[in-house]
Structure formats: C-alpha cells, structure tokens
C-alpha cells in the first residue's frame, strides 16, 4: 500500500510565473503539451499554431486552426483584468481572419466585458 501525500494549493500571481504575455505566456501556451491541455478543456483540436500574427498593424497572440472543422481560432492573452482595448482587439482579429472561435485568456473578466461577449455570442451566428 502506497501513501499519497496531499499538498496545499496556494494563490500565485500569474505575473510571477509569466512576466510578459508575448514572450513568456504565449510561448508557453503555444507548446504542444499546453495546447493539448487547452484542447481538453474547451473541446477543440487546435493545430498549426502561429504566434504574433499580423492583422493590419495589430498582432494577434496566437492563431490556430481547429482540426475537426478547419475553422480559424484566435487566442488573445491578457494577464490582467479585461479592458476595452483587448475587447476591440479580439473583434478586430476575428473579423480580419474570419475566425469562428475566439479564446480570450484573462486573469479577471470584468462583468461588463462578460456581458459584451455574451451579447456577441447570442447575436452572431
């Protein structure tokens, strides 16, 4: 019989783990084993991961394709509370790439931005 030791969970500031969204977090997330974990959580099979994809003069953190549907998926990382700037960016990126799925990874989703995303989900095909 083996003895299993249980550890204690502690809160960690994401900025202590990843100092910079582009160079640290996006690079970490783009690794195959980490994308696989994201796939398992959201029910997609992401492939062809591209970092810092230009849409006009802006750059989307990660762009992928869902293997099952062939549709474009964008991933925007924001290691802080949501803001209007990033909300506008994800809409711009989705329009520029004709993405059917947007993944917005944030530390904290403000209620007004949750409502805006819900409204977009309910009023778009």
Image: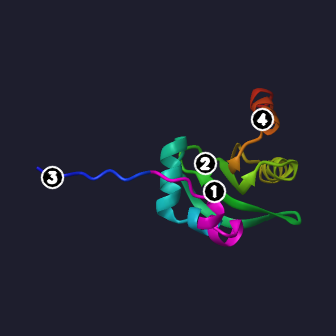
Whether residue 45 can be seen here? no
Callout 4: SS? helix
Q: Which residues are magenta?
A: 9-25
**Residue underneath mark 4:** 111
Measure the C-alpha gap from mark 4 to mark 2.
Answer: 32 Å
Q: Which mark is residue 10?
A: none
- Mark before the other along the chain sequence, 2 or 3: 3
**Residue underneath mark 3:** 2
The 10 Å Cα crowd at callout 3, few under 14, some 14 to 19, many 20 or more, is few
**Residue underneath mark 2:** 70
Q: Residue furthest top?
A: 122
- Mark before the other along the chain sequence, 4 or 2: 2
Q: Quadrant of residue 58?
A: bottom right
- Mark before the other along the chain sequence, 3 or 4: 3
Measure the C-alpha gap from mark 2 to mark 3.
Answer: 46 Å
Q: What residue is drawn where x is 53% and y is 66%?
A: 31
Q: Is residue 45 left or right of residue 98?
A: left
Whether residue 88 can be seen here? yes
Q: Is residue 25 left or right of residue 56?
A: left
**Residue underneath mark 1:** 64
Q: Position of residue 83 (x, y in %)?
A: 83, 49
Q: Residue furthest left?
A: 1
- Judge whether 54 appears above or below 2 on screen: below
Callout 3: SS? loop
Q: Position of residue 9 (x, y in %)?
A: 46, 51
- Mark before the other along the chain sequence, 3 or 1: 3
Which of labels 3 and 4 is toward the front?
3
């Amino acid at each position: 019989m083996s003895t299993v030791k249980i550890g204690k969970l502690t809160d960690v500031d994401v900025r202590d783990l990843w100092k910079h969204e582009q160079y640290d977090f996006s690079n970490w997330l783009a690794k195959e084993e980490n994308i696989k974990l994201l796939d398992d959580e959201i029910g997609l099979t992401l492939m062809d991961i591209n970092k810092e994809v230009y849409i006009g003069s802006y750059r989307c953190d990660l762009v992928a394709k869902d293997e099952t549907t062939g549709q474009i998926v964008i991933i925007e990382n924001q290691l802080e509370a949501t803001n209007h700037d990033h909300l506008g960016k994800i809409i711009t990126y989705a329009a520029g790439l004709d993405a059917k799925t947007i993944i917005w990874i944030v530390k904290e989703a403000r209620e007004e931005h949750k409502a805006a995303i819900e409204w977009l989900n309910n009023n778009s095909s």
